[in-house]
Image: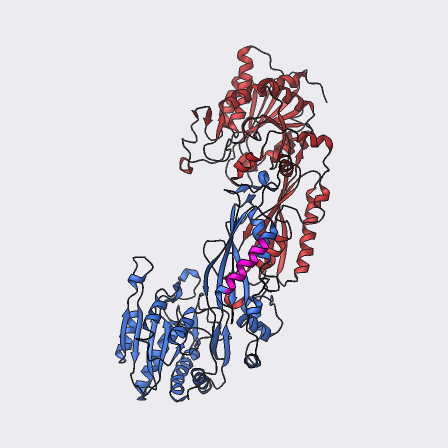
Chain colours: A red, B blue
Amino acid sequence: MAHFLEKELKALGAQVELRELGPQGAGTNVDLPPIVLGKYGNDPNKRTILVYGHYDVQPALLEDGWDTEPFTLVQKDDKLIGRGSTDDKGPVLGWINSIEAHQQAGIEFPVNLVFCFEGMEEYGSEGLDDLIHEEANKFFKDVDATCISDNYWLGTTHPVLTYGLRGCSYYSVTVEGPSADLHSGIFGGMVSEPLIDLTHVLAQLVDPQGKILIPGVNDLVAPLTPDEEKLYDNIKYSMDDLYSATGSKTNLFDTEKESLKARWRYPTLSLHGIEGAFSAPGAKTVIPAKVIGKFSLRTVPNIQPRELDELVFKHIDNVWKKLNSKNKIEVKLLHDGLWWLSDPHHWNFEAAKKATKAVWHVDPDLTREGGSIPVTLTFEQALKKNVLLLPMGRGDDGAHSINEKINVDNYINGVKTLSAYLHYVSVEPSS
Amino acid sequence: MAHFLEKELKALGAQVELRELGPQGAGTNVDLPPIVLGKYGNDPNKRTILVYGHYDVQPALLEDGWDTEPFTLVQKDDKLIGRGSTDDKGPVLGWINSIEAHQQAGIEFPVNLVFCFEGMEEYGSEGLDDLIHEEANKFFKDVDATCISDNYWLGTTHPVLTYGLRGCSYYSVTVEGPSADLHSGIFGGMVSEPLIDLTHVLAQLVDPQGKILIPGVNDLVAPLTPDEEKLYDNIKYSMDDLYSATGSKTNLFDTEKESLKARWRYPTLSLHGIEGAFSAPGAKTVIPAKVIGKFSLRTVPNIQPRELDELVFKHIDNVWKKLNSKNKIEVKLLHDGLWWLSDPHHWNFEAAKKATKAVWHVDPDLTREGGSIPVTLTFEQALKKNVLLLPMGRGDDGAHSINEKINVDNYINGVKTLSAYLHYVSVEPSS
């Protein structure tokens, strides 16, 4: 796929190079797929837009339950079905189609493009962060703004632009006592049980209404300004969308606005599970010797990871002391990633709003995402330029599922939107 | 092994039959190992003692970590090592050796023996309960008392007689919400998480000091009488035994007496684990859709299972209502078994005390066990005769572990004790 992109881009007159990741491959001997770097156009009078995408995909097998061969793109009614159709080969090809269309129509391309297409996104973007930082003042030095088309509309009918992502801090709490698992008949009642202790710790992190019980966390959240509040007006999202996505009516909030705020601009704490306890079907009378609880917080402005760690560690320490247990506890941060919040009034966004309006005849909703796309933040921090997330597909595309698809009109109008965006970029006054 | 026992017992002059369990095998086509029923002696002037044992064993493979071939008995220093040496082939052979010894010494056997040796004990004693009830007034009709040698000394130096076992009631609590697992980035904060709810329920069942938080359970416990209290005096058990058995100093009580009471005569509640949550190593950002918590109570006189169920269901129902969650909860009893408490002053026990004193030159400790041996209760209820647990091996024999052993002097003195017990039985006045 890297060579295909290289060939296609070169055929269009772009300058292309493949950056091999082999030696950076985390100490393995496997050659990683290269990052495709390219430049199309070099006019100092034009703005330069960095476009990022990825050509790798999630694994897929017919026997997973696909209706068609996952690696053969097929059209069925109004849908193009195949692995990568929406995540993220479709959008990557969209940029190429845009250049082709300009050439075939004899229209001057409105901006300089810089391409960064990686092949490791689904496996943690190995090597990409280093490359971005290294090339920030070299290959990427003229970039005026970044556009990433690697997410989805909130729903299925209304185009969106995305200006924020939550971060994630993932922790483990290990409680251990006896040197090996014990029989609950023999030892139950004589010893402190690690799983009982852990359960009491986990229950004091969050309540069933989703309220985070760690003192100080909610104080770090940026207050909701009237300007931000307005962004939640008229978002095309209904409680039925939530019911249908979760297959249940287990919503914590009764309104769309409160639900979206909870997903986008407030932190949450989820319990994921426990390692080391009895987790199989059936009934086993074991006292597990060592159990590891896993939980994570989705973070938002202005929660700083180190500050959060301190609050988490301190709270669990306080809870633990009150439990008065002879077992041992250890809390660890397993990984973290910062939230990202862009300025949706920047010229980069204004151009995308006009493009969306021109193609789809509606104003795009301005959305955030509850999850993370770490490369977004890396581009913004390394290049110090605005980043826009401009999705092509819909919320029901099934990016990581079976029968991944992109609707034909999302693809065609998507390519038009990318193209129109570049035209508006070329005339939008700096903000 | 059943045929070996049949042959040996017949060679000694016993009447033996094999009861096939095939058709009772829970709907399977596998022929289950038969129950060996036998009678030795038929003198109406003698007492008749039923002896129970089992000839099946736990699985064992050299590669599990055994130092020697598990199914070849080897003597190493003062130990006989091999699967089943202590649990329970050793004690079963002990009864046969006792008959042989009497015959070789030309001493009249002091009682009539009835044998019941099964081959399914390690797999739930399939079919045995039915057989005991069916034969209570037939094959077992003349039985005056039962003796089971299938447990262990409390420690490693002092012989014991066992007069009580705890029961066990095992429950599951299922909490479910969404129709499938959700991504915590996208849905965290919008929906009620089943694992958060379950954690809050489990934390309200028991506290880290082992206190059962279900109202009413502790009120059902029989009060400690001065007579029972006396049974805890001078038991040869030290806190070091507990530290060494658990490889930790995570004891809930500081004294031997309180620890043993907690193990033998008070109920406990253990949390075993959670099915359906993330239980692997690593970090997965999942909101599990359906989680099943497992817990059990070890029960004691006078807790009745149905009464306990009611308290458990009612408490969880109350806790659940206060959580105010939109998820669904279901509490189920997975299995239960009643506690057993015998009269340690019965002639059956008095005979065993004298036998122990004669062979080991010490008075046996009177102990209970925290775990369950369900057949004990079945014999007592079906035959309405006293049951005595007279163990042969030590507390460190490693019954279900690698390198299972029985000490040579425990075996030899054990056979002597079984024999002496039968002699004292023949002269002990009825109590």
Q: Position of residue A265 (x, y in %)?
A: 66, 37
- In the image, residue B130 above or below residue B408: above
Tell me if residue B187 is in the magenta stretch.
no
Identify which residue, B340 or B120, lies in the foreground: B340
Residue A143 visible in rendering? no
Identify which residue, A230 or A173, lies in the foreground: A230
Q: Position of residue B48 (x, y in %)?
A: 34, 82
Residue at image point 55% right, 34% down = A241
In the rendered view, does B283 fall on the left or right side of B5?
right
Identify which residue, B340 or A177, lies in the foreground: B340
Q: Main secondary structure of the magenta part?
A: helix
Q: Residue A262 lies in what quarter of the image?
A: top right
Q: How many numbered tags mark residues here? A: 0
- In the image, residue A212 above or below residue B99: above
In the rendered view, does B106 fall on the left or right side of A54?
left
Q: Position of residue A349 (x, y in %)?
A: 66, 24
- In the image, residue B260 above or below residue A140: below
Identify which residue, B350 or B281, lies in the foreground: B350
First to last magenta residue range: B307-320
Q: Position of residue B223 (x, y in %)?
A: 57, 75
Tell me if residue B313 is in the magenta stretch.
yes
